[in-house]
Amino acid sequence: MKTGHNQLNPALFVFILYLCIYRSRQQNEPQVSPKMVCQQCSGAVLNGSSVGEFCSSFAGRVAGRCCLGNETSGRERIIGLDLSNCSLTHVDNLQEASAAFIIDLSINSIFNMSDAAFQGFSKLSHLILPAHMACPGGNSSWEKVELKEGKRLCKGQRNTCKQPGRTPANCPGYARCGPYGPGFFECSCADNYHGYKCLREGQFPTLQVLGPLGASTFVLSLLLWLTQRRKAKAL
Ligand SMILES: *[C@@H]1O[C@H](CO)[C@@H](O)[C@H](O)[C@H]1NC(C)=O
Ligand SMILES: *[C@@H]1O[C@H](CO)[C@@H](O)[C@H](O)[C@H]1NC(C)=O
Ligand SMILES: *[C@@H]1O[C@H](CO)[C@@H](O)[C@H](O)[C@H]1NC(C)=O
């Protein structure tokens, strides 16, 4: 048997490599999805409403039940969400709006809402709920909790890291505590630390940089290993 037949065709190899890189690029494209949550019910953000007023003062763009604002990266994000009078019975899957500053869920018969629905909503500073509902994370997660015109207002999200009894000591090693939605916090490694419990020191590329590169290097190594192995067999 000739070794030449078992070697991977260079053109094919480059093509596979290209596919790998192309695919990982595609997966990293920012998702410009039609934002389902804005169409969760008919109608649009009204001018006189809380979200409407917020939207005009922040020069946002109304799209259905959402107020969209530009990020520094040029991408549009949901900065306000008005799902009031929307016949909601439970709250889940609001993740598309996790960068929102204001969310209105009033005038709905919601009887099921877990705190986890707002996990990651670290910018949320104004949440309007039906009166019978409690603010997510409890009263202590908010600067002010009010009952007004049959609505529960949760104003000014408190930083969970800075609350008495919940010290950054919850984060192990050289990790830093950061807010991650009402009642939630996240631990991220302090500068120069990485690895298990952030105990390793030294510069480390971020996961985003590592992601696509890592995937294609892995496939490259695998292919090389396979061709090597075939060669070895043939010899
Ligand atoms: C809301 O206000 C904007 C400008 O302030 C106006 O163009 C628009 O027609 C108003 N929409 C409604 C439904 O009143
Ligand atoms: C809720 O919506 C219904 C129909 O869409 C409307 O008739 C009603 O006035 C609304 N209620 C409030 C409080 O806005
Ligand atoms: C939270 O605050 C509201 C308004 O001040 C109050 O009605 C409610 O009882 C409080 N809830 C708890 C669990 O303390």
Image (tube, rainbow, N blue to C red):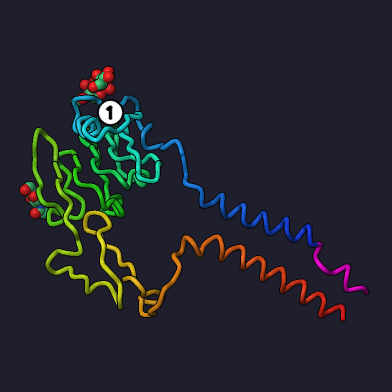
Tally of numbered tags: 1
Amino acid type of the residue that numbered disc 1 sits on in the rendered structure: Val
Q: Is residue 78 left or right of residue 182?
A: right
Location of residue 75 (image quadrant):
top left
Q: Ligand 1 shows up in which quadrant of the image?
A: top left
Would you identify the image quadrant in which residue 197 lies? bottom left
Q: Pointer 1: what residue? A: 45
Residue 147 percent location from the top left of the image: 8, 40
Quadrant of the image containing the C terminus: bottom right
**Mark 1 residue crowding within 10 angstroms, few (<14) / some (14–19) / many (20+):** many
Q: Residue furthest right?
A: 1
92 versus 194 height, above or below:
above
74 up-or-down from 121: above or below: above
Task: Residue at 21% x, 33% y: name it.
Answer: 57
Say whether residue 4 is magenta: yes
**Range drawn in magenta:** 1-9
At which x and y percent is residue 24? Answer: 57, 55
Disc 1 secondary structure class: loop
In the image, what residue occupies the spot 29% across and 31% down? 86
The answer to which image quadrant residue 152 occupies is top left
The residue lying at 33 percent from left, 67 percent from top is: 188
What is the x, y in percent for residue 169?
22, 74
> Residue 104 versus residue 79: which sits nearer the camera?
79
24 within the magenta span? no
Q: Position of residue 74 (x, y in %)?
A: 40, 41
Q: Quadrant of the N terminus?
A: bottom right
